[in-house]
Amino acid sequence: MARYLVSLVIVSLLAGPAWAQERAPTADEVAFARLPREAQALLGNLPAREALQKYDYARQNLVALGTPYPSPERLRAQIEAVLAPNVVRSVSAGATSFPPLSPLVPSVAFEYR
């Protein structure tokens, strides 16, 4: 019994420091922590590396669209578009166009009237 007790004490002394040590954050986790809070909230459910890739892709899209320094709202909208690429946004002219635009009526039909 004493032999088991001594081996238990030795194992606990050797394993104790390993449990007490905290894992150092990776470079990706540090970079993710530097992102704006709103971006962190949107990308929080992804691993740090994938979240950074999505964030960089959204920033590249904004630069390509001519907005190198976007507002926080525009950045948030672009990150949401990157996260859900299959969401179709309405691009209709709406009720403000006259005559109402329809994809079924060719534009040349109005020239003859």
Image: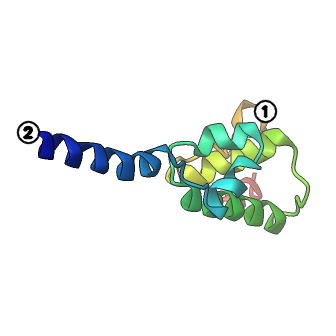
Disc 2 element: loop
- Give the SS element for disc 1: helix
Residue at the spot 63% in from the left edge and 55% down from the top edge: 29
Judging depth in this view, the residue of 62 and 54 nearest the camera is 54
Q: Residue at x 55, y 60 (%)?
A: 50
Q: Position of residue 60 (x, y in %)?
A: 75, 66
Q: Residue at x 62, y 40 (%)?
A: 42
Residue 78: x and y in percent read 70, 50
Could you say which quadrant of the image residue 62 lies in? Answer: bottom right
Specify which label sits upstream in the sequence, 2 or 1: 2
**Identity of the amino acid at label 1?**
Thr
* Most distant residue in the left direction: 1
* The N terminus lies in quadrant: top left
Return the residue nearer the eye: 60 or 46: 46
Q: Quadrant of residue 53?
A: bottom right
Q: Is residue 24 above or below residue 57?
A: above
Question: Could you classify mark 1 by the number of other residues whose Cα lies within 10 Å: few (under 14), some (14-19), or many (20 or more)?
Answer: few
Q: Which mark is residue 108?
A: none
- Outermost residue, top direction? 95
Q: Which residue is mark 1?
A: 96
Between 1 and 69, which is closer to the camera in this rendering? 1
> Marks 2 and 1: CB-CB under 8 Å?
no
Left or right side of 90 for 110: right
Residue 1: image tag: 2
Q: CA distance from mark 2 to mark 1?
A: 89 Å
Task: Name the mark nearer the viewer: 2 or 1.
Answer: 2
Judging depth in this view, the residue of 61 and 1 nearest the camera is: 1
Q: Position of residue 113 (x, y in %)?
A: 75, 51
**Does 15 sit left or right of 79 as displayed?**
left
